[in-house]
Amino acid sequence: MTQTKTQLKRDIAALAAFEPRKLALRMLAEGRAEDYLDWAMEDGYWQARGKRRGEGSKRFLPAPANPVGLPQRCRALSEPTPLDEMLFYIRSQTVGPKDIGPMMRQAMDSVEFFMASALEIALDSSPLDAFERTLSVLSSVKVRASGALPLGCASWSSLGARMMCCPESDSFLPSKLPEYGLLAKAVLRGKIDFAQAMIRHGFYPQEAYKWRELLRRLLEVSFDLSREREQELLGATDSDVARLLAWIDEKAKQMEEIDEAASSMFNQDGPAPYAIVERGSEAIKALFAKGAPATHQSIWAAMATGRADLLKAALDAGGDPNCVDKGGDLLLSWMDLSRVDETMFKLWLARGGRIVVSIYAKNPFTWDDKKSAAINIARQGRLDLLKQASENSIAPFGFTFVHDGATYAPLLAEALDNGHAELAKWLVAEKGCSLSHCDDQSGKPCSKLASGDLLAAVMAEENRLSMAQIPGGKDGAGARSI
């Protein structure tokens, strides 16, 4: 055991003095998150293993042969540096469970930001403009549109690694702040301008009741956590707790007012009369102007009443174009699209609107029982919106996917199942879908989902395309093939 403790001291001293780690911390302090991620995904990965980039290792798997994708890069911002993770992993295997806490405290006392996530380091060390540059990596339209972050991605915590490594805190702080850990820390540190920046970038609870829950839990933290323990886990905190909690209470009240105004824009038959919709929209925009966070209700109200001005205001206020309802479903996966015109839809796409659940999923259109916007668009026969998505989506997507040797065409299946002939013909003629492709829900060929004139019309389109590919066919040689 003595030998283990001696080696631990040497490892901690070496990590504290390691220049590449110091450089990584400077990158985060300066808002150079992309540079940090390049290091963490390549050189940092190998340095943590005592190797140069590309060297083989019998003990550890080599780095992936393919370029690391957006999901891995996004996740790395909510994790500690690879050097910290490796030291903790190796040394936690050589000490008993009772020794992990003292080991962590020894490392945290000696190594700046040991086991802190990259986002936590940026919060603690960056000026506001640099911190916003780091947040912008996660809030970029490319990340939002591609599905690199899970649905409801605002509910991440970036404090877990440091706290959950300390047994004394396992039963306390993580259970109090399981979500929105970074926002909670910003508030407790008195960094309200940083917390407001997180709202602008969409990383906050997007429902009022969750702000109330956050308020309740922070009250418990402020009463139950000793000052010494608070500083160990969170750093120097603001002594004016009442002011900080009042700020959270104000945000909750603003969101409740927004949801009340959004609800007034509807009655049991649909959108309320124009004057009432106008009044509700203006009330919501006035709250946004005061720094109120957008709610998923405000985005739903904007799109369901055809108010592009309100949608833009909600997105400018930090609203997530891919916001989810209380059940975790994308709003555009189920809502009535009859009042969503091409102008509004183009704005939604430009802000990172996600057509599929994730371009990284095996089935991009339905993932873990969550439907995509594309499925709802096809179900409602909105050929105009699907064409615009095909042309203007930030993240390119396909109209079919292959799994276990079979080709699936979910959008064609939806079009046929709901009787949308023109949409079905367009998918066949322009997007390579076929009646022989399968429905992703039943596994049956799409041809089994239609009959009569609808099936005949789509079959005629397929036959026309087949003839066009045959020299001397009806449409002549050299015609476009699919």
Image (cartoon, rainbow, N blue to C red):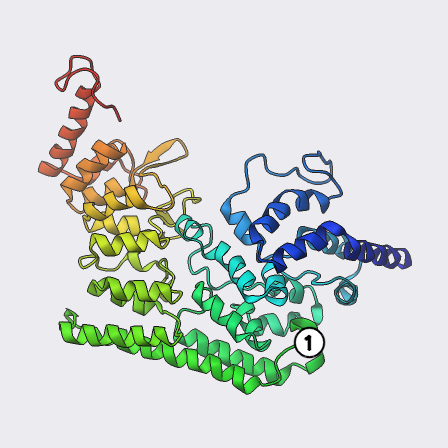
Point 67% across, 43% down: residue: 43
Name the amino acid type tagged 1.
Gln
- In the picture of the structure, the residue carrying the numbered disc 1 is 231
Number of marks present in the image shown? 1
Residue 266 shows up from this direction: no
**Above/below status of 4 relative to 57:** below
Point 37% across, 53% down: residue: 352
Decide if residue 120 is on the left or right side of residue 249: right
**Above/below status of 468 relative to 34:** above
Element at badge 1? Answer: helix
Decide if residue 466 is on the left or right side of residue 402: left
Question: Which image quadrant: the C terminus?
Answer: top left
Point 67% across, 34% down: residue: 54
Residue 162 in picture, x, y percent from top left: 66, 64
Q: Residues within 10 Å of mark 1 (few under 14, many from 20)?
A: few
Residue 281 in picture, x, y percent from top left: 24, 72
**Above/below status of 116 relative to 477:** below
Question: Which image quadrant: the N terminus?
Answer: bottom right
Residue 39 in picture, x, y percent from top left: 63, 46
Near-viewer residue (418 or 217):
217
**Figure quadrant of residue 469:** top left
Point 76% across, 43% down: residue: 50
Residue 382 shows up from this direction: yes
Residue 401 in picture, x, y percent from top left: 36, 37
**Figure quadrant of residue 150:** bottom left
Decide if residue 126 is on the left or right side of residue 358: right
Residue lying at the far top in this picture: please name it. Answer: 472
Near-viewer residue (293 or 212):
293
Residue lying at the far right in this picture: please name it. Answer: 2
